[in-house]
Image (cartoon, rainbow, N blue to C red):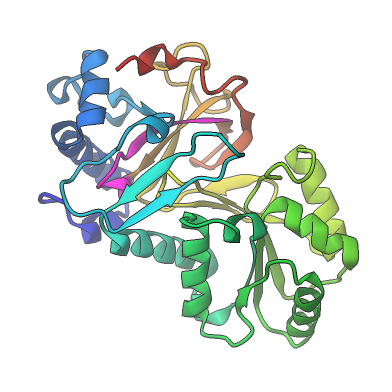
């Protein structure tokens, strides 16, 4: 990790510290990540020209499907792969230091939800559990273990058992976190309805081909009614990132201090948009020190205030649009 230490990343406490570290990480990855270096060279971007984070090039996320994106020669200890339909090329994130990932999601969760030991964690992630190498399953499994509660655990297709546990724990005043993929939460509501008073319901997005896609407000209205809660929480993460943003409701997300969202113009990928304007989501994730911290995603969104942001959808034909920059 050169002279950049994980504790320096996770102790960031100001915009100035973030900006300084982001520029330091950029220089490190330019020198040590062959894929990212080639991409920057293609754009004629060199560290000597980059003085602000707004000038840093963002690597299109599709490179995680076609290249080994690494900024270190250290041994690969874990490979995370994205979900995808049969025959679809999936993204691959090669991880050389799992401790960095653990620090990132543990500290991030603690910032937004407090001590994990104060929660019962119920994971409803059937589509993820049915395959290997899911970074989300790795994270939730760790949180389950950290919660150290006998009722914490994963639920696959045993929805009736989950319903009974959820109802019992909530009525006993336990702090419950039910985290699930969207279609599975809807499946649960088809066999039962709830009036929960001590439970956080968190969706991780995606119908995974199991149900028709719906807009967030429609999905959240159904979930709020079915679970009897005021707000539906959300987690924004992906295979290519080692950090997560969280929403406590209304689809408004916030990042931990070592992660930042920027919005790019939909027609010109090198131009950034101002607050309130919709565009493509660029992510700076400094936890990605050993892969690439500067990623142009295929998601659409906008920054609203105090650097909080909304997800508004995905690019149409996202695998081809804007990929004239992909010709490495």
Q: Position of residue 302 (x, y in %)?
A: 57, 31
Q: Is residue 305 left or right of residue 165?
A: left
Q: Nearer the viewer, residue 191 or 271?
A: 191
**Membership of 289 in magenta stretch:** yes
Instruction: Using the rendered image of the protein, determine whether residue 121 is visible from the camera's viewpoint.
Output: no
Eyeballing the image, is 266 above or below 8? above
Magenta stretch: give its range.
286-300
* Residue at 89% over, 68% down: 192
Q: Position of residue 73 (x, y in %)?
A: 15, 47
Q: Name the residue at the front extreme.
A: 87
The image quadrant of residue 216 is top right
* Residue at 37% over, 15% down: 325
* Residue at 37% over, 64% down: 102
Q: Nearer the viewer, residue 150 or 251?
A: 150
**Membership of 281 in magenta stretch:** no
* Residue at 43% over, 21% down: 272
Q: Is residue 252 left or right of residue 138?
A: right
Q: Nearer the viewer, residue 303 or 169?
A: 169
For the C terminus, the image quarter is top left
The image quadrant of residue 156 is bottom right
Q: Position of residue 218 (x, y in %)?
A: 82, 42
Instruction: Using the rendered image of the protein, determine whether residue 67 is visible from the camera's viewpoint.
Output: yes
């Amino acid at each position: 990790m050169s002279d950049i230490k994980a504790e320096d990343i996770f102790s960031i406490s100001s915009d100035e510290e973030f900006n300084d570290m982001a520029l330091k990480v950029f220089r490190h990855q330019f020198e040590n990540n062959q894929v990212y270096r080639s991409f920057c060279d293609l754009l004629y971007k060199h560290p000597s020209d980059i003085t602000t984070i707004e000038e840093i090039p963002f690597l299109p996320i599709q490179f995680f499907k076609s290249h080994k994106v690494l900024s270190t020669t250290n041994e690969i200890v874990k490979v995370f792969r994205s979900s995808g339909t049969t025959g679809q090329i999936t993204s691959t994130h090669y991880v050389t230091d799992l401790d960095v990932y653990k620090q990132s999601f543990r500290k991030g969760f603690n910032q937004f939800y407090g001590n994990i030991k104060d929660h019962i964690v119920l994971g409803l992630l059937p589509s993820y559990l049915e395959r290997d190498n899911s970074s989300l399953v790795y994270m939730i499994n760790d949180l389950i273990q950290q919660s150290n509660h006998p009722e914490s655990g994963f639920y696959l297709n045993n929805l009736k058992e989950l319903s009974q546990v959820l109802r019992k724990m909530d009525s006993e005043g336990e702090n419950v976190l039910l985290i699930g993929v969207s279609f599975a939460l809807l499946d649960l509501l088809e066999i039962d309805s709830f009036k929960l008073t001590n439970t956080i319901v968190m969706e991780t997005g995606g119908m995974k081909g199991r149900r028709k896609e719906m807009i967030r407000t429609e999905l959240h209205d159904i979930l709020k009614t079915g679970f009897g809660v005021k707000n539906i929480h959300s987690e924004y993460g992906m295979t290519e990132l080692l950090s997560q943003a969280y929403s406590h409701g209304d689809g408004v997300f916030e990042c931990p201090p070592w992660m930042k969202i920027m919005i790019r113009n939909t027609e010109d990928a090198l131009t950034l948009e101002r607050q309130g304007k919709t565009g493509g989501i660029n992510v700076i994730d400094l936890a990605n020190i050993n892969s690439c911290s500067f990623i142009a995603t295929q998601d659409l969104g906008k920054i609203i205030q105090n650097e909080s942001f909304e997800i508004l959808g995905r690019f149409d034909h996202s695998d081809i649009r804007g990929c004239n920059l992909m010709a490495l």
